[in-house]
Image: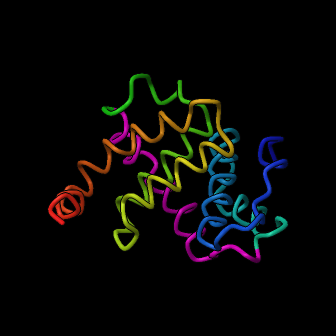
Amino acid sequence: MSEQFRHANPTKSRTPRHRSREFALQGLYQWLLNNEDAGAIDAHIREAHGFDKADKEHFNALLHGAIRDAAQLRSLIMPLIDRTISELSPVEHAVLLIGAYELMHHIEIPYKVVINEAVELAKSFGGIDGHKYVNGVLDKFAATTRSVEIQAGKKS
């Protein structure tokens, strides 16, 4: 496990859903760096300290869904970024995959919550201004994937 994840405390007064995102981020980071099997990553993460307090169902959806749909998610993200996918930091890349996956597949979660959670992950684990980049990209992504929800929010 990377030093940046070892020092972050995923059990520190976080909701089970937020913890599931933190653990999914760790798994995606590992997958991006080592191209390890999703099942092996899943098993390793589930043994981590504090995993028992995470939303296991949401973790499963995020980790396996983002890995399964990575090619599609990347193709939708690429027009929204100012560099190639390979030039993204692994943390930003993983956070964008999680955020894009949630925006597409978890419409029960308000888009503002999805973006805020992604920004918080980027602040906790990413580079100095990575959260600003993640915010901008996911705002644009939400404008296409959640346009009805965004318009409804503007009317109320």
Q: Establish if 87 lies above or below 100.
A: above
Q: Establish if 18 lies above or below 25.
A: below
| Image colouring | rainbow
Image point 46% across, 48% down: which residue?
70
Please give left or right for residue 33 compared with residue 1 in the image: left
Image point 78% across, 66% down: which residue?
11
Total tally of numbered discs in the picture: 0
Estimate the x, y position of residue 27 in percent, counting from the top left.
Answer: 67, 54
- Assess whether residue 64 is covered by the magenta stretch: yes
Magenta-highlighted residues: 52-78
Q: Nearer the viewer, residue 95 or 32?
A: 95
Which quadrant, please, contains the C terminus?
bottom left
Rendering quarter of residue 136? top left
Estimate the x, y position of residue 97 in percent, counting from the top left.
Answer: 48, 48
Q: Nearer the viewer, residue 80 or 122?
A: 122
- Assess whether residue 32 is covered by the magenta stretch: no
Q: Main secondary structure of the magenta part?
A: helix
Q: Establish if 114 lies above or below 91.
A: below
Please give left or right for residue 130 compared with residue 82 in the image: right
Estimate the x, y position of residue 96 in percent, counting from the top left.
Answer: 48, 45
Image point 68% across, 60% down: which residue?
23
Image point 14% across, 62% down: which residue?
155
Rendering quarter of residue 59? bottom right
Q: Establish if 88 lies above or below 62.
A: above
Please give left or right for residue 93 compared with residue 125 in the image: left
